Amino acid sequence: MDYEDQQCHLQHDHSTLSVHATDLQLAKFQERSNALQRKIAQWCMIQLLYFPSVACLRSSDIKSSIDSTQEEKPTNINLWLPSQIRRETLLPCNDSLSKYEWDLQRAQAFDALDDLCRHLCLQTHLYKFKDAQICSQRANTHAGIIIKNVEINVSVAAERYHRAWNTLSALAPSLARDAWTTELPKLEEGDIRGMGDSTVTIIPVLGAYECYRHILP
């Protein structure tokens, strides 16, 4: 799951690289890419001890990579977690390992919501502070950069929640988990707003998270 997060971060950073990126920026990105590829290669070897059936999936991935004219990027390598095996193949998957992934993904979903709430609160505070306290062009530019970074953090947290939610959705039928969407509802695009907006917001309630609609005047 950590490698899955690193894949998403790497893909996001690649999309933000401009055509005028410096040699140093490109070198650092390539270094991170190579490091992730080595980690995933080690994971693939260890995974075969617990998922022997993944060997045929890996062979198919390698064949597709060879047939392709482009080199496979570490961000595109399938990790073949239990949820992906259940979602995309008909191969058997160990229920115990599926339960481990369920518990970890559920915890990650709550962590992502916690991060999302925190960044949304910070975003709202920065907008209000900028409007009330900042006047000069230089200060406005600096504040805009800070707010942009917070907006990126909001998007990253929302994306983490979406990944965890989709994984739980794939695992739920085989593990007979029916009521999980009560504590972890699907996050729609319109739900990701600050507390001051007239829309659905996400707030912590008794250690869990629920969606409440706040219609403000």
Image (tube, rainbow, N blue to C red):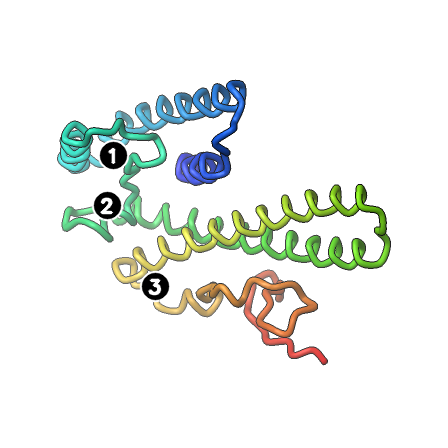
Residue 64 higher or lower than 139, as above or below: above
Identity, as a three-letter code, of the amino acid under mark 1 = Tyr
Identity, as a three-letter code, of the amino acid under mark 3 = Arg
Q: Position of residue 156 (x, y in %)?
A: 52, 47
Q: What residue is rendered at 64% in x and 56% in y?
A: 120
**Disc 2 residue crowd, few under 14, some 14–19, many 20+, Cα 10 Å:** few
Q: Position of residue 5 (x, y in %)?
A: 44, 39
Quadrant position of residue 34: top left
Q: Which mark is residue 177?
A: 3
Cα–Cα span, label 1 and label 2? 9 Å
Disc tally is 3
Identity, as a three-letter code, of the amino acid under mark 2 = Asn
* Mark 1 or mark 2, earlier in chain: 1
Q: Position of residue 131 (x, y in %)?
A: 80, 58
Determine whether label 1 and label 2 are within 8 Å by CB: yes
The foreground one among 127 and 6 is 127
* Mark 3 or mark 1, earlier in chain: 1
Q: Which mark is residue 50?
A: 1
Q: Position of residue 125 (x, y in %)?
A: 75, 56
Q: Which mark is residue 66?
A: none
Q: What residue is rendered at 27% in x and 40% in y?
A: 80
Circle 2 sits on which residue? 94
Residue 213 higher or lower than 30, as above or below: below
* Mark 3 or mark 2, earlier in chain: 2
Cα–Cα span, label 3 and label 1? 24 Å
| Residue 1 at least partly seen | no
Secondary-structure class at tag 3:
loop
Cα–Cα span, label 3 and label 2? 16 Å
**Disc 3 residue crowd, few under 14, some 14–19, many 20+, Cα 10 Å:** few
